[in-house]
Image: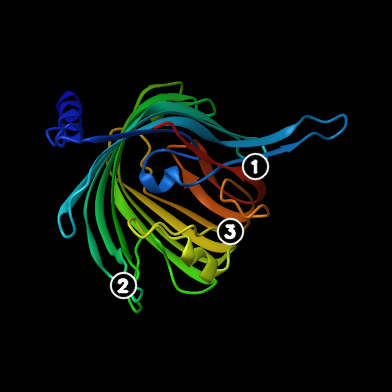
Amino acid sequence: MKKLSLWVVLTIFAGMPVSFAQLHSELLISKSFESNDEKTEPAIGSLTIPAGQPSSFLINGGIGYELTWIKVGASDENSYKKILSPFVVGNYNNLVTDKQRNYKAGGNFSLLVGKNTSGVDESGLIRVFRTNYFSMNHTVEYVRDLETPTHSLVYTLYLTQELMDNRKGHLNINKYHGEGKWQTFIGYNAGFELQDHFQADDPALKGYNFRNYHNGILRLALRASDPDTARRRVNTNTNTDPFVPFTELGVSYVGRYQLAGSTAHNEGYLPLFKAEFILYPTRNENFSVGFSYNAGSDPLNGLANQHYYLLSLKFKTKKRYN
């Protein structure tokens, strides 16, 4: 484990020699922080207080502080981003059969390398029409599970490609895509997880689990703003589209498989499926209402294998300081 820990540290800091001129910092409220994809997922909450009965509540979310270093290359030259995000996250849910009581604290380091390709649009303006980024997301965190109960240290490595091409007939990956009011989102990332339970009340749980990881996402969204109005508000240099869904249907599937381990219990294959309908009543992505069907388990967030329906309020924010 000592050799593996040294390898993790060297891997995370391997990209540090590149010099970065621009620095931005942001305060984040999200559901999780293990990858850049998960940072965009809102925190969720639900509360029921029946008369004369114990309260039922759900909290899945946390707070983080994101530091971003950027080195922007010219068109067809590599650009770089380094993102460092310390965070704390809590997962509490007594609405389900097997309760979820889990919290964690750690840091995420992401290195993104990619190219922006510019061209002249039909109006004669120079715009970025194609963006292709590859990202490596490293996370080191301490996890405390109160239901098991266990203490563990976790290292995750998730790999993601972000491809955005605004030309007709081209496919986007991990970005919204489409003309008009309807847009689609196709996302995928993969990687590895190492979780070392260094303290456990049950001796059978003590030890490490090394898993592979893959996550697929498919969404269909109805945009809130009129396409022509939104297009006029596009920044012609960065091509930032003010797209905010009004309603959204989505499915996601996470698969984990234990490749090696020293615990007495072999985890085997751990699936997690989610189908969800989301409504943005204020036409702002920072607040939404979701109804979902969930089936499976998530060992990093303390979710035992089960299936349930959930109606929840969802919140997120990203406040930039410079």
Q: Residues within 10 Å of mark 3 (few under 14, many from 20)?
A: some
Q: For the residue labelled by badge 1, is the local secondary structure a helix, a strand or a loop? A: loop
Look at discs 3 and 2 and give the one toward the viewer.
2
- The reply to whether residue 71 is in sight is yes
Give how far apart the Cα atoms at labels 1 and 2 are.
Answer: 56 Å
Q: Between 98 and 282, which is closer to the camera in this rendering?
A: 282
The residue under label 2 is which amino acid type?
Gly
The residue under label 3 is which amino acid type?
Glu
The answer to the question of whether label 3 and label 1 lie on touching residues, with beta carbons closer than 8 A, is: no
The residue under label 1 is which amino acid type?
Val
- Residue 125, x across and y down, in percent: 32, 67
Task: From the image, tell me which residue sits under label 1.
Answer: 96
**In which quadrant of the rendered view does residue 75 lie?**
bottom left
Please state if 127 lies on the left or on the right of 251 as rendered: left
- Residue 157, x across and y down, in percent: 27, 42
Q: For the residue labelled by badge 3, is the local secondary structure a helix, a strand or a loop? A: strand
The answer to the question of whether label 3 and label 2 lie on touching residues, with beta carbons closer than 8 A, is: no
Task: From the image, tell me which residue sits under label 3.
Answer: 276
